[in-house]
Amino acid sequence: MTQGLRAIPLLVLPALLYAAVALTMDPATVRTSLNEVFFNTYLPSGALFAVTRGQGVVMLAAGMLFLEIIKSTSVSRWALFENGLAFVAFTIAFIFFLLNAAFGTIEFALITVMMLVDFMAGFIVMTVSARRDVSFAGDHA
């Protein structure tokens, strides 16, 4: 059961969070919502450090991408399935980015690019691992 849950691409979470907001608003309201301050604090230097909602979602996606890169280093049947799901998630996100104005923001574009990087990392790790594991009959002669 837990292996099956590991197969779910983590970058789907920030994309679903974005979609939950974007699908309930018109495109202009989405942009306004993403620009609202989510968190702010003063640094020891006295500078105000402010993070908007959009930046927060991208930071969450970056954290998920880090975890996905770590997950991509394991080679198993579930990793192959997860990589296929990552490609499906990227494809759906890219279609939404192109065809739905509420998803045409830099924040969602970055999430979509992170999904592509996740898929490519998994593909490259699997290709390198398969190349290493394959032995040719001519190599042993």
Image: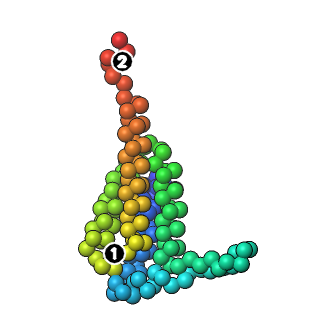
The residue that mark 2 highlights is 139
Asked whether the viewer can see residue 17, the reply is yes
The residue that mark 1 highlights is 104
Task: Determine the residue positioned at 42% across, 75% down.
Answer: 18
Dot 1 crowding, Cα within 10 Å, few <14, some 14–19, many 20+: some
Pick whichever of labels 2 and 1 is earlier in the sequence: 1
Task: Determine the residue positioned at 40% across, 37% down.
Answer: 128
Task: Determine the residue positioned at 27% across, 68% down.
Answer: 95
Q: Residue furthest top?
A: 141
| Residue 63 higher or lower than 33, as above or below | above
Dot 2 crowding, Cα within 10 Å, few <14, some 14–19, many 20+: few
Quote the CA–CA distance across marks 2 and 1. 52 Å
| Residue 17 higher or lower than 124, as above or below | below
| Residue 80 higher or lower than 140, as above or below | below
SS at badge 1 = loop
**Residue 114 appears left or right of 88:** right
> What kind of residue is marked 2?
Asp
Percent position of residue 92, x then y: 30, 65
> What kind of residue is marked 1?
Gly
Count numbered badges in the picture.
Answer: 2
Task: Determine the residue positioned at 34% across, 79% down.
Answer: 102
**Residue 131 appears left or right of 1:** left
The colour scheme of the drawn protein is: rainbow
Percent position of residue 53, x then y: 50, 79
SS at badge 2 = helix
